Amino acid sequence: MASRELRAGHLLLDAAKDSRLHPALQQIVANQPEFASWTPSSLCFYYMDAVKLGRRRVAEPDRRYQLLGVWTLATTLQEGGARRDLVVDMYASRNSLLRAAQAAEVRLHEAHSVVSDKADTTFDMYSIKIGRTLLVWSGRHTGDSTRVDQTIQEDWSVSGLRSNIRAARLDFQPAWSWPLIGSLRVEGKGDLAEALRSSPIRFVGPLYRGGGGHLRFFR
């Protein structure tokens, strides 16, 4: 699937060469060489109180979250070799955010999410429906929280509604992080379901809370 999503000017990054992999995944790759040539892919979901697009603040009147999802493939630029992950797809859960993104010529596809994270339950549950794919994660954070002191920065290549949107940069500044334990269930069809089922390793985490961030798109 990775080679099918690859675009001109990019090269796939092998797992053995990906310094951003979680230490647990790096250890697996080191101990099992058959995974060294696989290309890592990330699927991240950001649940936010509000999103600001230019001068416009997008928030729900009943304080429901705004969901933004990003599916990326680990790649480098063919010219120069700099790290620049390729955005396979992006998602949003609210019509207000989808409309605002369309006005800004940013391509987002609709997602539906139900979250159950009550304090009196043993496990949290996140259910996310994207097209024909249903993802259900059941688990909880574990161990002590860790304060995040540094900004998490990522550079992506992205396709907008028009060809003049070519790149994006995420500057994410969460306050705290936790490791996660639990299970991920993948149901349905589609490219996302196919990619997750065919992956030899699936790792969920960490969980970030607090803080904020900026996602900028460039021409």
Image (spheres, rainbow, N blue to C red):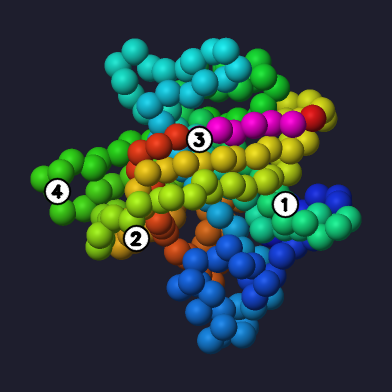
Name the image quarter holding residue 146.
bottom left
User: Of the residues tagged 4 and 1, which is closer to the observer?
Assistant: 1
Q: Nearer the viewer, residue 37 or 113?
A: 37
Q: Is residue 4 visible?
A: no
Which region shows up in magenta?
213-218
Q: Which residue is mark 4?
A: 121
Magenta region, mostly helix, strand or loop? Answer: strand
Q: CA distance from mark 3 to mark 2?
A: 21 Å
Q: Which residue is mark 2?
A: 179
The answer to whether the residues at label 4 and label 3 have Cβ atoms under 8 Å apart is no
Q: Which residue is mark 3?
A: 213
Q: How many C-alpha atoms fall within 10 Å of the one at disc 2: few (<14), some, or many (≥20)?
A: some
User: Of the residues tagged 3 and 2, which is closer to the observer?
Assistant: 3
Q: Residue at x 65, y 15 (%)?
A: 103
Q: Is residue 217 magenta?
A: yes
Q: Which residue is mark 1?
A: 84
Q: Is residue 73 left or right of residue 188?
A: right
